[in-house]
Amino acid sequence: MTPTTPKAVVVGAGIIGTWHALEMIDAGFAVDHLDADPAPVGASVRNFGLVWVSGRRSGSELEVARRARDRWEEIGARVPGVGFRPAGSLTVATTPSERFVMQEFSRCPNATERSIVFLDPDEVRRCNPAIRGEVTGALFCGLDAVVEPRHAPQALREHLATEASRRYRFHPGSRVTDTAPGAVLDASGGRWEGDVVIVATGAAYDHLPAALPLASRLRRVRLQMFETDPYPGQLTTALADADSLRYYPAYEPAPRHELGEQNEIGSLHHLQLLLVQRPDGGLTIGDTHAYDEPFDFALSEAPTTELVSRATRILGGELPPVRRRWDGVYAECRDGAVCLREQIDERVWLVTGPGGRGMTCSPAIARDTLDAAGVA
Ligand SMILES: Cc1cc2nc3c(=O)[nH]c(=O)nc-3n(C[C@H](O)[C@H](O)[C@H](O)COP(=O)(O)OP(=O)(O)OC[C@H]3O[C@@H](n4cnc5c(N)ncnc54)[C@H](O)[C@@H]3O)c2cc1C
């Protein structure tokens, strides 16, 4: 490090802040990386770890997701703790009408653009032999991948501390309370200055005075999830069920009305089945979506029961006991943008609001911030 080394401050050690720190280091900056907590406990460590390209909206969102997925693969090869696996995904049909909708979708340009193909039940079982239940077909997407959310942010920080030991410093327990031109101030009176300052505080997007005017462009969404003890079979892909077709923009050209009404519990909790096997065999399963604040502080049982029953039906075997449950809150842009990226003070950028695609898109979001800030 020399006296002319440019300096960056990154606030937030979730996945968005961490990828910004990484890109800044790659661009030659010295980085002070701050988080309010002793270690991040926000959305970035509570998610599935799905690098989910398949569901993304055509156009810039899909382009960002594909670019990000490539970057995840690249860093996964250098930092094994990230846990990158090019597992692909199966979106599984269990009824004739779900099969019909998926088959029709597989003929659309949106499917070709994402290398999504329709598989018959025998092909589904060959693709993922752990599926031994009632399936009528599935959509396979080989672009989808998985990382380990509980470990990835820390693995990336450790990588930075090793690779750029003189230019990277992590400062846990530093709660930022205000901004100034080219600086942020923390709760203990500290002032952190940089040529570029990134504020990536996730769902806490309205805690800094300078960010308040932007709050109306964002909203918070609460999700519930759980994880089982190790499952005896080995799942070769991530799984989704047909309810996921209702939510992801990629499936807009599909004849989704043929799916009929969602069942009561599904529509009450805006529920879909997503399932990822962890390296120790446990199954991370979710999820629900709540949009109205204040959110309930309690976890509810009914969605867990519903999701266990859906997973059991597809896998064709009983699930092991649930070993932990949790919820998580992310910020998303109300206008559907990939993220909100705005200068809130001189040389200070707020980057948040990636919604349910933040883990997927974080590498490309960070790269694009460097371009926007003119430092790439
Ligand atoms: C249950 C769940 C499942 C999901 N599944 C997926 C998935 O499989 N794939 C996918 O692509 N996306 C998924 N998402 C979305 C994804 O997790 C988020 O978009 C992403 O993690 C947001 O990252 P972030 O860094 O902006 O926020 P966070 O992870 O919340 O990080 C923000 C950080 O800022 C810190 N902070 C806040 N305020 C301050 C302050 N004043 N001073 C200093 N530090 C501060 C916090 O301590 C925190 O560590 C999921 C989200 C949830 C909740």
Image: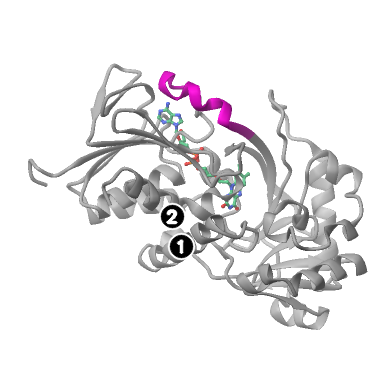
Rounded to the nearest angstrom, the CA distance separating label 1 from label 2 is 6 Å
Secondary-structure class at tag 2: helix
What residue is drawn where x is 76% and y is 51%?
Answer: 272
As for residue 367 lying within the magenta part, the answer is: no
The relative height of residue 352 versus residue 249 in the rendered view (above or below) is: above
Asked whether residue 112 is in view, the answer is: yes
As for residue 212 lying within the magenta part, the answer is: yes
Task: Locate residue 51, reporting x and y percent.
Answer: 55, 59
The relative height of residue 243 versus residue 54 in the rendered view (above or below) is: above
Secondary-structure class at tag 1: helix
Q: Main secondary structure of the magenta part?
A: helix
Comparing 255 with 278, the one in front is 255
Name the kind of residue labelled 1 in the image: Arg
What residue is drawn where x is 50% and y is 27%?
Answer: 214
- Picture quadrant where residue 53 is located: bottom right
Q: Residues within 10 Å of mark 1 (few under 14, many from 20)?
A: some
Task: Locate residue 360, reporting x and y percent.
Answer: 53, 55
Q: Which residue is mark 1?
A: 67
The answer to whether the residue labelled 1 contacts the one labelled 2, judged by CB atoms less than 8 Å apart, is: yes
On screen, residue 341 versus residue 122, left or right, reads left
Q: Residues within 10 Å of mark 2 (few under 14, many from 20)?
A: many
The relative height of residue 213 versus residue 162 in the rendered view (above or below) is: above
Asked whether residue 234 is in view, the answer is: no
Which numbered tag is attached to residue 98? none
Instruction: Tell me the magenta residue range.
Output: 207-220
- Can you name the residue that lies furthest to the left here? 3
Q: Which residue is mark 2?
A: 364
What residue is drawn where x is 74% and y is 43%?
Answer: 288
